[in-house]
Image (cartoon, rainbow, N blue to C red):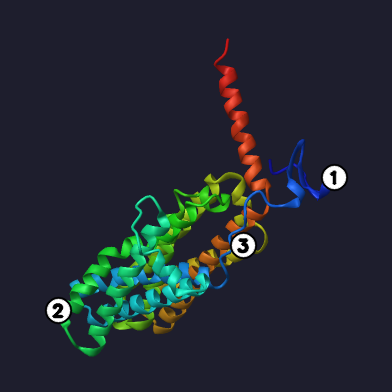
């Protein structure tokens, strides 16, 4: 496959043609087979990163609270509240009107990832905000802790629902890796929350360092498995702007994880690790977003896998006829 030549051009009637060996992919008058998502940059990549970081930070805060690490717990609660609130702002800005977000809360539809995601984001944001406000003001400590605990329970869904939301679309670069993408996002979220803990609570950062390293390993392992399994669409993750961004993300994540192992002995290493892990998490979300949009623009990523599946089906059917 990799050795076959690829040529793009315009055929009769202005249709877009992509030639690979003997195969030819055309689209009607040069129009994409799929409609490219209209989501904007930086709104949606920021929404993807902030929501994941907020969810994992809430989990970190809950665990720190249970083990008596007050500084780390406060840092996690504040990061969760700020991240969730900023995530809602980014989403509403992309939707243009706040009422569109509120309309998604009118009904709960379990079969719709968008509906389920809205019902995860809205209560999580409120609970995280209430927990952080109680911590900062000292008012209503018991309800504040209860809100923080409830946010921590919702947090795993908060870190991964955006991956499910992307994978539920027809965009090949998001749909093909539907098995691995939630693990990529979960690992990235854990690493970014660990970065917050290392920078904001250095005296109690041991759990945050372990979280950062574990999240980095999960993200890098799942990313590699994702690109190996997803077939033709993996090309969009390795080439062009998305490929460059994702390579930088992997490098930053790996360096950040290495520095996290040294952060217990060096404050500077902790800050550098936090910066690298945060940069890696943001770049991962942006790279995945752009790779998906590239597979929506190019009809080859839609048509060629369909042709391969049809040919495989014919081969299987032909093999069963004697």
Look at discs 2 and 3 and give the one toward the viewer.
2
> How crowded is the residue under tag 1: few (<14 C-alpha within 10 Å), some, or many (20+)?
few
Q: Which mark is residue 90?
A: none
| Label whose residue precedes the other's in the sequence (3 or 1) | 1
Question: Would residue 233 be seen by someone viewing this image from the given angle?
Answer: yes
The image quarter in which residue 67 lies = bottom left
Which residue lies under the disc numbered 3?
Answer: 242
Q: Residue at x 43, y 79 (%)?
A: 269
Look at discs 2 and 1 and give the one toward the viewer.
1
Q: Secondary structure at mark 2?
A: helix
196 left or right, relative to 285: left
Task: Say which of 159 and 171 sits in front.
Answer: 171
Which residue lies under the disc numbered 2?
Answer: 142
Q: Secondary structure at mark 3?
A: helix
Taking 111 as reference, is 207 above or below it? below
Q: Residue at x 43, y 72 (%)?
A: 99
Q: Residue at x 14, y 79 (%)?
A: 142
């Amino acid at each position: 496959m990799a050795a076959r030549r690829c040529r793009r051009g315009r055929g009769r009637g202005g249709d877009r043609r992509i030639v690979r060996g003997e195969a030819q992919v055309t689209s009607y008058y040069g129009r994409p087979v799929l409609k490219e998502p209209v989501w904007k940059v930086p709104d949606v990549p920021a929404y993807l990163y902030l929501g994941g970081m907020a969810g994992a930070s809430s989990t970190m805060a809950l665990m720190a609270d249970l083990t008596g690490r007050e500084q780390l717990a406060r840092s996690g609660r504040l990061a969760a509240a700020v991240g969730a609130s900023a995530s809602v702002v980014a989403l509403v800005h992309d939707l243009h009107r706040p009422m569109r977000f509120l309309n998604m809360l009118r009904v709960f539809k379990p079969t719709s990832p968008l509906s389920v995601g809205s019902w995860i984001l809205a209560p999580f944001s409120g609970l995280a905000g209430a927990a952080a406000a109680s911590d900062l003001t000292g008012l209503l400590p018991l309800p504040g802790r209860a809100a923080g605990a409830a946010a921590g329970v919702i947090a795993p869904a908060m870190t991964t629902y955006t991956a499910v939301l992307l994978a539920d679309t027809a965009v090949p670069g998001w749909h093909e890796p539907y098995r691995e993408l939630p693990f990529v996002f979960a690992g990235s979220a854990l690493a970014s929350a660990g970065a917050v803990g290392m920078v904001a609570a250095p005296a109690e950062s041991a759990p945050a360092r372990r979280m950062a390293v574990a999240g980095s390993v999960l993200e890098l392992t799942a990313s590699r498995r994702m690109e190996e399994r997803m077939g033709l669409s993996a090309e969009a993750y390795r080439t062009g702007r998305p490929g460059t961004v994702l390579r930088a993300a992997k490098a930053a994540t790996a360096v950040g994880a290495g520095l996290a192992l040294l952060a217990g002995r060096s404050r500077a290493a902790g800050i550098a690790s936090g910066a690298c892990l945060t940069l890696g998490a943001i770049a991962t979300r942006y790279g995945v977003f752009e790779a998906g949009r590239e597979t929506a623009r190019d009809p080859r990523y839609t048509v060629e896998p369909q042709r391969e599946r049809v040919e495989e089906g014919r081969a299987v059917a032909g093999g069963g006829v004697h």
